[in-house]
Amino acid sequence: MLRCGLQVLELQEQLCWPGRFVQANGLAAGLAASNLVLYAFVYTPLKQIHPVNTWVGAVVGAIPPLLGWAAASTELSLNAMILPAALYFWQIPHFMALAYLCRNDYLAGGYRMFSFADPTGRRTAWVSLRNCLYMLPLGLFAYNWGLTSEWFSFEASLLTLGLTIGALSFVLEPSPKTARRMFYGSLLYLPAFMSGLLLHRLPSEQKAHNLAENNELDGVLYGADLQDEERARQKRQDTKPSRVQSLPPVSYASVAPFPFLPVPIYES
């Protein structure tokens, strides 16, 4: 066991060596370091302190996709938030089911879980259902933001709808049976969601083509209005009476209450 722990520490040292961070970029290095600190010094102690550890752990689990995106593109965009958002919201019903099913085991181990203050399981079920609903628009966002084709929006919505139905059954009848059904549904959801995201992703060339088409459509729809506004602005500028600009006398400017400000210019 000790040998295994030493090997893990050695691997962490190799992965976290500053030279490797430099080879990626500062953003990826910052995300990696923050996730390490969040996991080791916030999430781990919170397990035995407060039930909020589940939500903090969800953040820890959602950061790695952001890290990979930052390492590959050196920046974060809206598209980078799809998979982290799915991972964050997915972890809540997944671990709420575990916390309900293994409540006695968590209690014996000294872990503070949300289900401890919820003997009926109803609040745990409602929290699970709420986070399932948050996942419903993710497929549509991925399509609207040009990350995937439109098929993924339908598939992701159907996947989330199935998981939501499982959470709803848990709400209507909090029991080990319905909690286990929701847990198994969460196990199926994540690999299916990731597979769909990979299968229906759009290459960079297609994204650029779609963006160019959208810009061209905007130009056709709004180009005439912009041209009319430009003509009207130019006409107002041409008909505007000319003004003569002048500086005040030095003696007048010297009495200004704030002499460090620029000297005012008067138009007549």
Image (cartoon, rainbow, N blue to C red):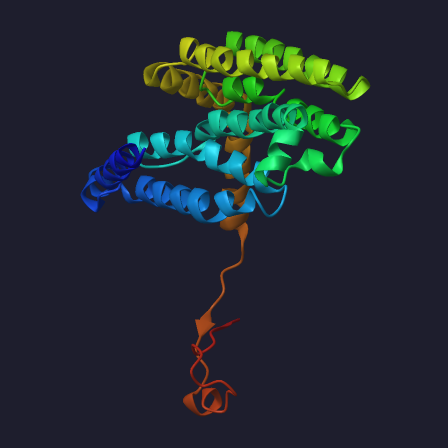
Q: Where 120 falls versus 175 (above or below)?
A: below
Q: Residue at x 40, y 35 (%)?
A: 76
Q: Which of 46 and 1 is in front in this view?
A: 1
Residue 158 in percent (x, y) is at 62, 9
Q: Which residue is drawn at 62% across and 15% down?
A: 160
Q: Where 112 falls versus 176 (above or below)?
A: below
Give the number of marks. Answer: 0
Quadrant in which the N terminus appears = top left
Residue 155 in percent (x, y) is at 56, 8
Residue 94 in percent (x, y) is at 59, 23
The image quarter in which residue 109 lies: top right
Does the image show residue 31? yes
Q: Which of 261 and 266 is in front in this view?
A: 261
Q: Which of 240 and 69 is in front in this view?
A: 69
Q: Which residue is drawn at 41% across and 13% down?
A: 198
Residue 143 in percent (x, y) is at 51, 17
Does the image show residue 231? no
Would residue 241 be found to the left or right of residue 67 on screen? right
Q: Where 260 falls versus 210 (above or below)?
A: below
The image quarter in which residue 126 lies: top right
